[in-house]
Every structure is written in structure tokens, then in C-alpha cells.
Image (tube, grey):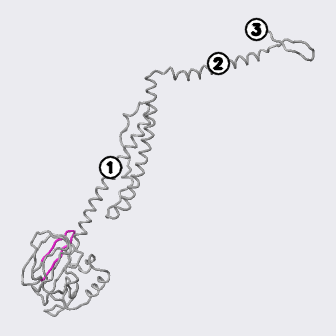
Amino acid sequence: MAKVKYYYDADTLSYRKIERKKKDVFRKSTFAVLAVVLVAFFGFIGFSQFLMSPNERTQKREFENLKLHYELLSKRIEESSKILNELQERDNTIYRVYFEANPIPEEQRKAGFGGVNRYKDLEGFDNSAMIKKATKELDILSKQLVVQSKSLDEIVRLAKDKEEMLASIPAIQPVANKNLKRMASGYGYRVHPIYKTRKYHWGMDFSAPKGTPVYATGNGVIIKAVRTRKGLGNYVKIKHGYGYVTVYGHMEKYVVRKNQKIKRGDLIGYVGTSGTSTAPHLHYEVHKNNRKVNPVYYYFNDLTPEEYDRMLEMASVENQSLD
């Protein structure tokens, strides 16, 4: 039986019975029930942590560990992608430009994986979305790495070709400056020394004492080494590759043989006056793609700008050739 409660009324100087209204009773009862329910709910959640089985606790730790490793993996993929993007930029704008190769189009570098669903086997798991996202990022990165690797292989090949080409192009004088008396005659129309008529002179004549060394002007292979009393006399022809051939005429003698490989600066013979020649000199020609071209444009490796300007000036004088 509930206890009866009273309160003291100061106006009447007497105790009065406390009357409890039904709505107040209902409100208090409702609050009490809700409080009990909430305490029970949160208590159950907290207590359920202690009620988890060892297997459930292990799975939870593994899942938290998986999430941590996934975040680290995503960060590493992002950092690797940034490095790869910088390399791709240098590849297109520096390396391939220098070696005269076309840049790789963006759509080729970053093309997606079309067709069937490549990640269907990864569906149906608790963490499928996370696994699929990581796998797709790795696939894209791997494909870009393959494209970039092939591009760098091509750059290495182009670099080797470029190095070989630069070593093969005729780029020095066949007779050293210290041994030259003068550049006797240049490329173009000149007066023939015997017939005294204007005739096209297809090379350059370097006047030097008999026996002066003659050097190969670029890497190549000897394709002709001929001794004759006519025309160019004792002469050598070198095939350099890349469309270049050089001819060295009127030599006293040569010291190479057919099919011999030579390098720029190797000794091939000595200045003479063999064949149709009026004085000791070397007749030198440069052929490019089966056309005879002016050799004066191929001395950029061993002449200073001042020497080269002087050479151009002398080569332009229409004088009498020595052959």
C-alpha cells in the first residue's frame, strides 16, 4: 500500500494531504520506463563487447587491420601515380622531343579496361567495393607503367641510334689545320687546271705537302680502295650509313682495305698527286642520299666559328681547281 504524503499549509497552520493527479503519475511512470529501457540498451551494447566470442573479436581486429592497410595502400598508389605522371610529362615534352619521336597520346597512356566486367569475381563479399576499387587502381597504374616502360625502351634505342649517327656523320676536316697550306678550291663551278674551261667541281681541294696524313671524317666501312693513274688516282670511298658516303682522292697511297671498319679520325692514307692532278692535294667529296653535296657544311666538329667563317669565304671564291 502506497504511503500517504502530507504538506504543511502556512495559511491554515495545518497539514494537508498531497493529492496526486493521474496525468502526473502517467508522465512520471513513462519517464521511468524509458530511462530503464535506455539504460538497459546501452548497457547491453557495452556489455556485448565482453560477450563477443574469441572468433568474433579476431575477425573484428582483422577487419580494422585490413582497413588500415587499405588506406596505406591507397596512399602509396596515389603517390606512385603522381611520380608516374611527372615521368610521363618529361617523357613527352623532353625525351621524345629531343629524339624526334612523337609524344604518346593521353588516351593511349590512360586508356581504361573495356569489355567484360573484369572485377565480377570480387563481388559478393562484405568489403567488395573496397577490394574492387583498390584492384582497379592497381590495374590502371600497372598499365600506365607498361606503356611508360616501352616508351623508355624506345628512348634508349633512339639514344643509341642518335649516338651512332652523330659519330657517323662526316664532321671534321680530312686534313688537319696544322698541315694545310690552304684550301685550294671549293665546291661549285671552277676553272679546270688542264682544260682551262669552267667545270663543276664536286668537292673541295685541300693543298698540303705530299705525305700529309689523311683522316676518316666519320665512322664507317671502306667500300672502295682503288689505285689508278686516271681521274681521282689512288682514292678511298667510305660508307658511313644514314645516307652518307665520303671520297678521298689523289692520295699518294692509302693504308686501308675494302670492308675494313674505321672510326672518325683514323688514318686512311697520305696526300699525293696521283691521277689527274697538278699539285699535291686531297680532293674530298661528301655524298648524301646518292647526291654530291658541299663538304663545307660538314666541318662543325673541329673548327672554331672564326675558322669556319674563313673556310666559307675561301670556298666561295671561283678559282682554278687542282684536278
Q: Quadrant of residue 262?
A: bottom left
Q: Is residue 213 magenta?
A: no
**In the rendered view of the protein, which quadrant contains the N terminus?**
top right
**Percent from the top left, x then y, of residue 96?**
34, 61
Q: CA distance from mark 2 to mark 3?
A: 22 Å
Q: List the residue tagged with mark 2.
A: 36
Q: Earlier in the sequence, mark 2 or mark 1?
A: 2
**Percent from the top left, x then y, of residue 155?**
30, 59
Q: Nearer the viewer, mark 2 or mark 1?
A: 2
- The type of residue carrying mark 2 is Val
Q: List the residue tagged with mark 3.
A: 2
For the point 10% across and 83% down, the residue is 252
Q: Nearer the viewer, residue 263 or 232?
A: 263
Q: Is residue 57 above or below residue 234?
A: above
Q: List the residue tagged with mark 1.
A: 146
Q: Quadrant of residue 22?
A: top right
Q: What's drawn in magenta, residue-wise?
A: 236-250
For the point 11% across and 79% down, the residue is 235
- The type of residue carrying mark 3 is Ala
Q: Nearer the viewer, residue 302 or 279?
A: 302
For the point 40% across and 33% down, the residue is 123
Q: Is residue 319 above or below residue 237?
A: below
Q: Tag 3's secondary structure?
A: loop
